[in-house]
Image: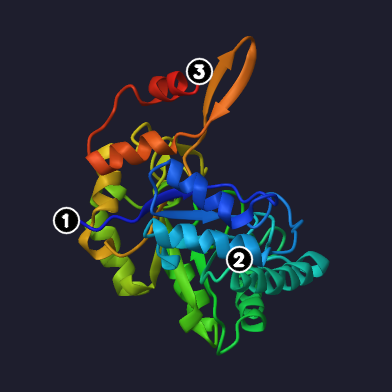
Amino acid sequence: MEKLYIGSHVSFKNQYQLLGSVNEALSYGSNAFMIYTGAPQNTARSPISKEKTMAAYELMKENNIDVNNIVVHAPYIVNLAGSGSNYDFAIRFLKEEIKRVEELGLKKLVLHPGSHVKLTREEGINNIINALNIILEKDSKVDILLETMAGKGSEIGITFQELKQIIDGVKYNEHIKICLDTCHINDAGYLVEKIDDVLKEFDEIIGIKKIECIHVNDSINDIGAKKDRHANFGEGTIGFDNLIKVIYHPLLKDVPKILETPYVTATDDSKEKVHPPYKFEIEMIKAKTYNPNLIEDIRNYYK
């Protein structure tokens, strides 16, 4: 039987914390998942509950969810490529976030490398390296997974070479890993249809063993658009068969795959509602069969 570690972004609400996250993941048929320890758009965070974490681990044990298949994502607004007070805050926040990840007993923190904004690209890259050298210690228990980026605005990390440059500049770079995002690499100019060639290039530049998480998202955009707009699984320009090739690729069999696909919009009594697609997308992935009625089935399920 083929190995498959598949899941999605799930909520982490203060009332239930990790226990709620595990329950949500199980409702989608997942054996992997990703959380933010608070809202993705801000840095407000609540204390971690040891009691809820212990209950979550019991539930994970009952359902064969390995801790190595759970990842935490840092907030989008944390920018290690910037400067001034925001830069100093980003470093302080990430140090605290790593402590929270440790409290949860987790080991992987996905991070957007950053945007250089008004600085030069080289200055932005050097700032990321400097920040990671401040944040990471030799005995760090949490690895930082730099995410491959689409190239929107002044984002850094849109080529494997840029990510390699960052890795090479970090002293304790054994704690730097990679999160490969299929929508992002498509929008950055990598042809997901030829995933063997993409992985060969990645292996030559960085090393395939550095990939510790994969965000499997389709894209609304054509290759090289540098826009970063996710589409539901099989509903975009990458396509179902090409994404399935990524998920079941033998070189990636041990890597958790995480869906960040858009919620499906529906209208009910003149009110717009959104629904998670993950249960249905995971069913398609497990069956390796595209459902052309995916969006309608999701809407009907949540009526």
Label ID, residue 23: none
For the question of whether residue 303 can be seen, the reply is yes
The N terminus is located in which quarter?
bottom left
According to the picture, the residue beneath numbered tag 2 turns out to be 121
| Mark 3 closeness class: few <14, some 14–19, many ≥20 residues within 10 Å | few
Q: Nearer the viewer, residue 74 or 153?
A: 74
- Residue at (58, 13) in percent of width and height: 268
Q: CA distance from mark 1 to mark 3?
A: 35 Å
According to the picture, the residue beneath numbered tag 1 turns out to be 1
Secondary structure beneath label 1? loop
According to the picture, the residue beneath numbered tag 3 turns out to be 303
- Residue at (66, 77) in percent of width and height: 131
| Mark 2 closeness class: few <14, some 14–19, many ≥20 residues within 10 Å | some
**Amino acid tagged 2:** Arg
Which x, y percent locates residue 66? 40, 64
**Amino acid tagged 3:** Lys
Secondary structure beneath label 2? helix
Vertical order, 40 against 289 (above or below): below
